[in-house]
């Protein structure tokens, strides 16, 4: 069939074939729909902030706020009720706790660990994903440790990332999600988890994470945009490459990843398709902060329909082969899907 379609002279022809027949009514469109978005496909990010004050607005992400723990608990509970299977936690680390070595990342009582324990306790039905990377904890905003010359120290960083992953697993995190793009991190984290008895802790590897302009608003949210020196091109991937993404994914699977993440989302759906077809692994994508901001900004100006853009973009992830999507629209989409 595929080959016949590729050969135009043998393709089905009009009027025997009228493709519009199966688009005519709502019921037939539903009947032939190839992909279906449900709340099961959605993962909600939550930004955390210390204290018991009010949630804090993030200017570049209208509608998303940094949440003190009490509010985060309510957000997790509401996500669970909407049928969302998991949340992913990100901290806004107090600036006075940010250091060159990112030591706060492996403090067993850091904001992420406290939130993980509290959510596990209050909403045990929802999965908790914790990001592993040093950027919310370093005073230079990089995901790894830097040498005096400002170069990333890959192997020294692995030690810190492993300690970070361990305190998260000990706090009850279900899925460790390394987003740092250091070479070898999945392997050392997997070995450490096994050794510490966390045999069932999943690893969702940000295997193909590109050096992207679309992370800008996220860096505002975690407070690393003003501190970040330089760029992340020595560890995040070149947007020009796709073969390299397959090599990244192959290595992470071999090192013990259970699930693969591609990031950003919409501009990289070709990578999603290739990864899904090549490895047949649970495959996820991240509709990142800049993608959220683009839809929000256009909708606020009345330039597009926000609700339609949300559901269309999320459905596109499914069509490309995603098993799920991390999206700042997750809760909103789950509400839209339930009506
Ligand atoms: C940190 C991290 C980033 C994102 C997720 N984890 C930012 C970065 O790599 O600079 C971006 C998510 C988003 O833009 O929504 N390693």
Image (cartoon, rainbow, N blue to C red):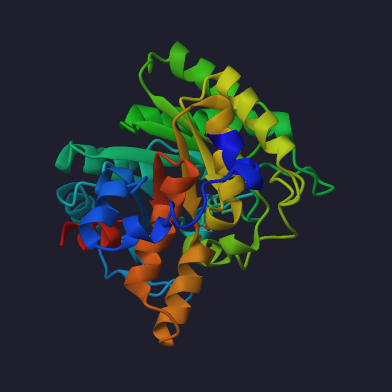
- Tell how many labels: 0
Residue 110 in sight: no
250, 316: nearer the viewer: 316
The correct choice, above or below, for 70 with respect to 147 in the image is: below
Name the one closer to the observer, 171 or 9. 9
Task: Please tell me which residue is depicted at 23% across the width and 43% down the height of the picture.
Answer: 119
Which residue is rendered at x = 80% and y = 45% of the image? 151
Residue extending farthest right: 149
Q: Is residue 251 visible?
A: yes
Between residues 322 and 59, which one lies in front from this camera angle?
322
Looking at the rendering, which quadrant does residue 254 occupy? top right
In-image side of 338 versus 179 (left or right): left
Across and down, in percent, residue 309 comes to: 40, 68
Seen at 51% across and 25% down, the residue is 257
Q: Quadrant of the C terminus?
A: bottom left
Q: Position of residue 298 (x, y in %)?
A: 47, 80
Residue at 46% x, 72% y is: 295
Give x and y (percent) for residue 200.
35, 19
Across and down, in percent, residue 258 comes to 46, 25
Residue lying furthest front in this view?
Answer: 15
- Could you tell whether 179 is left or right of 127 in the image? right
Residue farthest to the bottom? 301
Residue 303, by quadrant, is bottom left
Q: Is residue 291 left or right of residue 116?
A: right
- Judging depth in this view, the residue of 280 and 101 nearest the camera is 280
């Amino acid at each position: 069939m595929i080959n016949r379609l590729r050969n135009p002279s043998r393709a089905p022809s009009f009027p025997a074939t009228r493709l519009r027949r199966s688009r005519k009514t709502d019921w037939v469109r539903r009947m032939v729909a190839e992909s279906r978005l449900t709340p099961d496909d959605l993962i909600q990010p939550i930004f955390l902030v210390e204290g018991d004050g009010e949630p804090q607005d993030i200017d570049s992400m209208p509608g998303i706020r940094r949440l003190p723990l009490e509010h985060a608990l309510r957000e997790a509970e509401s996500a669970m009720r909407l049928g969302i299977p998991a949340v992913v936690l990100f901290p806004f680390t107090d600036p006075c706790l940010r250091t060159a070595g990112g030591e706060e990342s492996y403090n067993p009582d850091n904001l992420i660990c406290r939130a993980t324990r509290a959510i596990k306790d209050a909403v045990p039905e929802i999965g908790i994903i914790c990001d592993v990377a040093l950027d919310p904890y370093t005073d230079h905003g990089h995901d790894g440790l830097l040498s005096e010359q400002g170069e990333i120290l890959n192997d020294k960083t692995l030690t810190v990332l492993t300690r970070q992953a361990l305190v998260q697993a000990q706090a009850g995190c279900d899925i460790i999600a390394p987003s740092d793009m250091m070479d070898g991190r999945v392997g050392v984290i997997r070995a450490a988890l096994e050794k510490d008895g966390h045999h069932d802790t999943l690893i969702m590897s940000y295997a193909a994470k590109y050096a992207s302009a679309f992370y800008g608003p996220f860096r505002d949210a975690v407070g690393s945009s003003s501190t970040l020196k330089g760029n992340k091109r020595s560890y995040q991937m070149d947007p020009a490459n796709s073969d390299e993404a397959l090599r990244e994914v192959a290595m992470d699977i071999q090192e013990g990843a259970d699930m693969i993440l591609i990031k950003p989302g919409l501009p990289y759906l070709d990578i999603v398709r290739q990864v899904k077809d090549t490895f047949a692994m649970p495959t996820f994508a991240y509709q990142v902060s800049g993608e959220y901001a683009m839809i929000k900004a256009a909708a606020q100006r009345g330039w597009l329909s926000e609700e339609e853009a949300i559901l269309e973009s999320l459905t596109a992830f499914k069509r490309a082969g995603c098993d799920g999507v991390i999206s700042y629209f997750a809760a909103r989409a789950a509400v839209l899907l339930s009506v």
